[in-house]
Amino acid sequence: MARTEKATSIAELREKLSAARSAVLTDFRGLSVAEITELRTLLRKSAVKYTVVKNTLAKIAIKETGLAGLAAYFEGPTAIAISLADPMAASKILSTWGKTRPRFTVKGGVVEGQVIGPAEIAALATLPPREVLLGRVAGAFQAPLQALANVLAGPVRALASVLEQVRQQKQQSG
């Protein structure tokens, strides 16, 4: 690879990592071309780009991005799944796909600028979608308000019940 090609590769990787909402590093040793093609197709459907990188060039690229913590993960064959839109997409797809392939491993990655290890990526993959989490938060905010409304409505209900009983007694006696 010529020096200009290396400089171009470094600049492109630096730009992609800087713009990425998430990037997951994987070890693809032992996978067939068909399996990697299948994985790339799955990732492409979620707007995630999967590329094989040279470790030395990747280490140079991350020096100036503030992601120096990733350098430890650039050992052995490395491919990066980069997501510019959904920070959870790459981790979910890679974790799900990798469950049936013991040779495939997730090394580590970056989510929203934070360097994380394989355990954290696996934990992210198990999280429900954003909409479900927002619904749970809304429910948590709504529950105390609903309880307050029930408490405040209690005396009014009790008064209505008492008035109904008085009306029934008057009808029976008169």
Image (tube, rainbow, N blue to C red):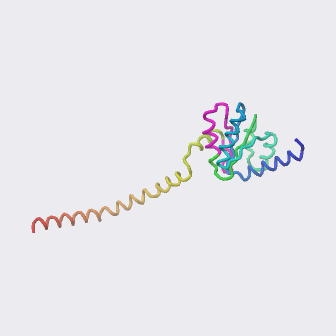
Look at the image and give the residue range highlighted in magenta: 90-116
Q: Image check: 91 left or right of 80?
A: left
Q: Is residue 31 above or below residue 44?
A: above
Q: Image check: 110 left or right of 7?
A: left
Q: How many marks?
A: 0
Q: Which residue is painted at 64% across and 51% down in the image?
A: 86
Residue 102: say if magenta: yes
Nearer the observer, 117 or 21: 21
Q: Which residue is painted at 52% across and 51% down in the image?
A: 132
Q: Image check: 30 left or right of 140?
A: right
Toward the front, the furthest residue is: 34
Residue 117, percent across and down? 66, 40
Nearer the observer, 13 or 141: 13
Q: Is residue 82 above or below residue 30?
A: below
Q: Quadrant of residue 147?
A: bottom left
Residue 162: say if magenta: no
Figure quadrant of the N terminus: top right
Figure quadrant of the C terminus: bottom left
Toward the bottom, the furthest residue is: 174
Q: Is residue 151 above or below residue 75?
A: below
Residue 93, percent across and down? 62, 42
